[in-house]
Image (tube, rainbow, N blue to C red):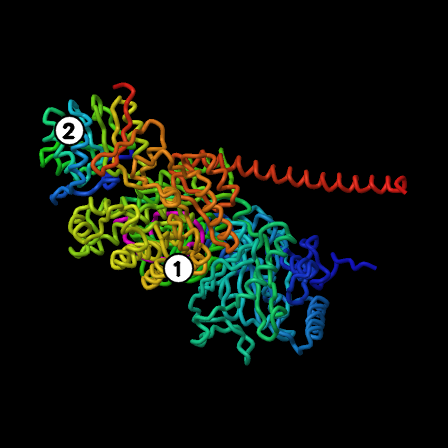
């Protein structure tokens, strides 16, 4: 006979499914779902909502609770009233004895669990699971209580009762009022689950929690128990995995000085110092990261929506049995809304170039906000100081902070990663948030005005008008984008040489990034030959001017990549700069044919001091402004050695290739075509075809010689074969290919050729982006259609052949 | 309002220089004076810190009005001090009155984004447009209307106005 679940006091996880949310709350129901879907979760049971209901009814405290709520909360906007009501109700619940049959049922289930795992008095985690908690559309990050390392019957009972009372934390009361849930309708169940002996633990999102990219799984982990992440006490290691290829694309291992562990003597959770040899070691191995990503993918497939998952790695078990999923719930932010437009309550404004960076952290919830900093260390202090639109600055938030977080215009915390409490709640509330800013509570001054740029994780002194303004215009931008969302598989990038118009171009073209940021005009703006500048001691001037130009472009397109091409003046062009006569001509750099003379990569390794200035500018933008979307491209590479040497100089300057720093070369000289495999071996991440020079050099046509101009044509078969070869070899090795020359801007048939060959991106002039995108979209559709038709034809042929064969068989008897 | 002060740094070539003019600029001045010996008005766009062409052009074509524009006020002020008639203008939002009646508008190695703007301006006011581009931007020869001129190692592109 089927068990009547609705009257049960205890239900084991394996008996549960998502239809049981009303009985055991979302958390327990999910655990049941997961066990039944073959997702590894530690075993345990639920103390049902029915048990809680009987507890409050049989002890006659239910009516008292609702009376306290009605009497105490008279002004729903006054946070202190929530606190007062909470205090009264919780002490009432925690002092009321549990009826005997309920008590016995809990104790018996705990004994059974210990028996099942073969331990005496197993350590368990006791967590509340409110029945309205995980309803889609209402994320209650960390809501209500979790007790870890609970051991022994009495402690389990005590923790269960505390979980019941946690239904009435100030924040929980606030949330229900805010979301319009009636208090009487919300019941609470409690999950009692075996503790993982946690070596490492963390959080996974099957959608990028900051950008909303659904192709990425974000994993954050720390040593010890996962509590340290959500509470924000430790900044976690950060991994990003490509959901399709299951390749790790980002890996950021940070120093982890503290961990939460179970004290072997008392069984309590304690903060411990991480031994030095483990502090900078990754808290997950690569194979664990990939296996976790697979599990995350399975969970998302199972539930059909992006998930927010807690996991733990057991110290005592071998891989892969050591991976446990502790919890999973729907990710609520991106499934409900788009990026919020930035807000401002700013005063007098300064420009970004003048603005002083006070501190940097991890961007956790996008947006820009100008406001007054309020440095607060407790919810009580927040209650006194936080006014609407203030920047809430603290070490880390927890659920009790939520009413004040809601008032804040931006949130900055010293601690935490992308999945900590402050990050999750601010994303849900749509408030810009920077976490892990280390000394924000020390560096920011109370009451001063700052600009929080939570897109790049930078906090500036004063109101930075430039940052806020484009954000205000964003509203219009979004509508434009919404009107014509042409999506292409091939990325459409834009070429730029004037940083000052980058904002406008980013907005108007909606390009996927900058495929070519030209440095030459920045040099012209400085107005001197770089050697003359160095002679005059103007190195810093060049670094600052270049960094400023690159920053403008990177910020305008953030988080889309921008590819900076190192200075590619030809000697005759350097000659025209002041100082050129001496440092270019007299130095013997100007040969008879500048286009194939002293230019590109060869210059960088011959005169590394100039090249290093460009590297320093790039580093400044990536580190000081936190704009990690700046990549680089080495032009006019002739030999593999030049690339290797240029790369070495970059590394010496602190520019290390990685998932967020790609190094491309330009394919212009035929040697790069012929040796593309060798360049790939040397470590290039991408190539970009400079079709002008490539055509010149393959066809042997001097671009400056009028006598042969009429046969100059980028569409020549020789050029196309070269491009085709490079794309094929690169695709085989996962190296990206792009085009930044003029050919795609001038010839639609070149665009079609490139798309068919499978080029990764096409970079065109600003006025060509929109039409190129449309053209590429139509070509991609055409190609897909053709492939379908080919497939159909092949099937038809097979069919016909099969029929013909049939006929032969029919005829064969007659032939006998 | 865009333009004006906050854009002062935009695509400007900085302060005018007193260094000896490279022969490059001299070649450009000679080319222009040869192409437009009877010009009444010529405008250089984005003159920046290299007024050499302009200054030489003044002596080669004493009867022509030679005007310089730049987005940088500082550049314009200093050119004024050197006796060159110069005006602040943003080629992305040009004040057409400045260019009206010009026989020629020219620009030396402009950022490539400006080339299309110059062509548009030329056609609106009926002036020819001459560009001496960076070698990278020498694709103008592929675009209709632009005429390629090679003279004395100098490569220039000329867009003739249909109204002249």
Q: Which residues are magenta?
A: A353-372
Q: Residue at x 71, y 75 (%)?
A: A115
**Quarter residue A265 falls in:** bottom right
Q: Is residue A121 magenta?
A: no
**Quarter residue A535 falls in:** bottom left
Task: Please give the chain letter of the residue carrying mark 1.
Answer: A
Label 1's element?
Answer: strand
Q: Which residue is mark 2?
A: B66
Q: Which part of the image, by quadrant, shows the N terminus of chain A?
A: bottom right
Task: Please give the chain letter of the residue carrying mark 2.
Answer: B
Question: What percent of the width, then of the height, locates residue A811?
Answer: 86, 39
Residue in the foreground of this view, choosing between A435 and A783 = A783
Q: Is A326 situated above or below A581?
A: below
Q: Main secondary structure of the magenta part?
A: strand
Q: Is residue B48 left or right of residue A641?
A: left
Q: Which part of the image, by quadrant, shows the C terminus of chain A?
A: top right
Which numbered disc covers residue A394? 1
Q: Is residue A27 left or right of residue B61?
A: right
Q: Is residue A789 left or right of residue A642?
A: right
């Amino acid at each position: 006979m089927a068990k009547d679940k609705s009257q049960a006091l205890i239900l084991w996880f394996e008996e549960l499914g998502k239809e049981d949310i009303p009985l055991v709350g979302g958390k327990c129901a999910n655990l049941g779902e997961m066990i039944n879907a073959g997702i590894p979760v530690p075993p345990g049971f639920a103390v049902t909502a029915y048990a809680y209901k009987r507890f409050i009814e049989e002890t006659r405290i239910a009516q008292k609770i609702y009376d306290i709520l009605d009497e105490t909360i008279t002004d729903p906007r006054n946070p202190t009233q929530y606190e007062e009501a909470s205090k009264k109700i919780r002490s009432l619940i925690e002092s009321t004895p549990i009826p005997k049959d309920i008590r016995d049922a809990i104790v018996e289930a705990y004994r059974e669990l210990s028996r099942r795992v073969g331990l005496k008095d197993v350590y368990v985690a006791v967590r509340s699971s409110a029945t309205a908690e995980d309803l889609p559309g209402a994320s209650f990050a960390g809501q209500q209580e979790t007790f870890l390392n609970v051991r022994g019957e009495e402690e389990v009972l005590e923790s269960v009762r505390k979980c019941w009372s946690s239904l009435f934390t100030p924040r929980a009361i606030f949330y229900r009022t805010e979301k319009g849930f009636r208090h009487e309708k919300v019941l609470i169940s409690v999950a009692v689950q075996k503790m993982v002996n946690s070596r490492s633990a963390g959080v996974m999102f099957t959608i990028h929690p900051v950008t909303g990219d659904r192709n990425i799984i974000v994993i954050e982990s720390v040593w010890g128990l996962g509590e340290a992440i959500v509470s924000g006490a430790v900044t976690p290691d950060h991994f990003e995995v490509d959901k399709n290829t299951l390749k790790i694309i980002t890996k950021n291992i940070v120093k982890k000085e503290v961990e939460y562990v179970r004290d072997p003597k008392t069984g309590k959770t304690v903060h411990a110092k991480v031994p030095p040899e483990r502090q900078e070691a990754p808290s997950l191995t690569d194979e664990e990261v990939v296996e976790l990503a697979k599990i995350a993918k399975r969970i998302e497939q199972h539930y059909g929506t992006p998930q927010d998952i807690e996991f733990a790695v057991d110290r005592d078990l071998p891989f892969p049995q050591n991976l446990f999923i502790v919890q999973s719930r729907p990710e609520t932010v991106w499934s409900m809304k788009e990026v919020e437009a930035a807000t401002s309550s700013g005063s007098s404004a300064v420009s970004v170039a003048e603005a002083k960076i006070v501190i940097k952290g991890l961007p956790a919830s996008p947006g820009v906000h100008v406001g007054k900093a309020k440095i607060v260390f407790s919810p009580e202090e927040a209650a006194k100081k936080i006014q609407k639109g203030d920047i809430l600055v603290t070490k880390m938030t927890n659920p009790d902070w939520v009413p004040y977080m809601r008032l804040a215009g931006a949130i900055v915390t010293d601690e935490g990663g992308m999945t900590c409490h402050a990050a999750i709640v601010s994303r849900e509330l749509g408030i810009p948030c920077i976490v892990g800013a280390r000394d924000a509570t020390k560096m920011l001054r109370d009451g001063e005005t700052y600009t929080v740029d939570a897109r790049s994780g930078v906090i500036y002194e004063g109101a930075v008008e430039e940052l806020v303004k484009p954000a205000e215009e964003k509203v219009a931008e979004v509508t434009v984008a919404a009107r014509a969302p042409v999506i292409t598989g091939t990325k459409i990038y834009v070429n730029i040489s004037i940083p000052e118009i980058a904002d406008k171009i980013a907005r108007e073209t909606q390009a996927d990034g900058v495929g070519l940021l030209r440095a030459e005009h920045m040099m012209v703006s400085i107005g001197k030959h770089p050697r003359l500048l160095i002679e005059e001691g103007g190195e810093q001037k060049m670094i600052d001017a270049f960094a400023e130009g690159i920053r403008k472009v990177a910020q305008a397109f953030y988080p889309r990549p921008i590819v900076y091409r190192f200075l590619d003046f030809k000697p005759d062009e350097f000659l025209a700069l002041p100082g050129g006569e001496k440092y270019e001509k007299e130095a013997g750099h100007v040969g008879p044919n500048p286009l194939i003379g002293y230019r590109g990569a060869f210059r960088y390794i011959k005169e590394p001091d100039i090249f290093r200035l460009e590297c320093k500018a790039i580093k400044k933008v990536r580190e000081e402004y936190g704009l990690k979307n700046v990549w680089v491209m080495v032009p006019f590479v002739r030999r593999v050695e030049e690339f290797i040497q240029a790369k070495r100089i970059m590394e010496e300057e602190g520019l290390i290739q990685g998932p967020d720093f790609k190094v491309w070369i330009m394919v212009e000289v035929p040697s790069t075509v012929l040796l593309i495999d060798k360049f790939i071996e040397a470590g290039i991440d991408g190539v970009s075809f400079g079709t002008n020079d490539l055509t010149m050099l393959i066809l042997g046509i001097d671009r400056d010689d009028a006598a042969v101009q009429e046969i100059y044509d980028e569409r020549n078969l020789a050029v196309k074969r070269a491009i085709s070869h490079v794309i094929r070899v690169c695709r085989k090795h996962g190296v990206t290919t792009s085009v930044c020359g003029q050919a795609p801007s001038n010839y639609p048939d070149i665009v079609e050729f490139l798309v068919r060959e499978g080029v990764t991106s096409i970079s065109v002039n600003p006025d060509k982006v929109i039409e190129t995108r449309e053209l590429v979209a139509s070509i991609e559709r055409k190609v897909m259609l053709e492939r379908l038709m080919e497939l159909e034809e092949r099937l038809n042929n097979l069919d016909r052949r099969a029929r013909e064969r049939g006929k032969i068989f029919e005829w064969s008897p007659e032939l006998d | 309002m865009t333009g004006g002060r906050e854009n002062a740094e935009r695509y400007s070539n900085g302060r005018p220089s007193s260094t000896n003019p490279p022969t490059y600029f001299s070649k450009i001045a000679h080319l222009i004076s040869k192409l437009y010996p009877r010009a009444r008005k010529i405008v250089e766009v984005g003159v920046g810190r290299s007024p050499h062409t302009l200054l030489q052009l003044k002596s080669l074509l004493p009867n022509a009005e030679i005007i310089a524009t730049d987005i940088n006020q500082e550049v314009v002020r200093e050119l004024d001090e050197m006796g060159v008639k110069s005006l602040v203008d943003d080629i992305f939002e040009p004040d057409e009155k400045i260019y009206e009646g010009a026989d020629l508008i020219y620009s030396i190695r402009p950022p490539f984004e400006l080339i299309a703007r110059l062509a548009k301006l030329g056609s609106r006011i009926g002036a020819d447009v001459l560009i001496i581009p960076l070698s990278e931007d020498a694709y103008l020869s592929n675009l209709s209307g632009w005429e390629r001129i090679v003279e004395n190692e100098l490569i220039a592109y000329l867009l003739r106005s249909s109204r002249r």
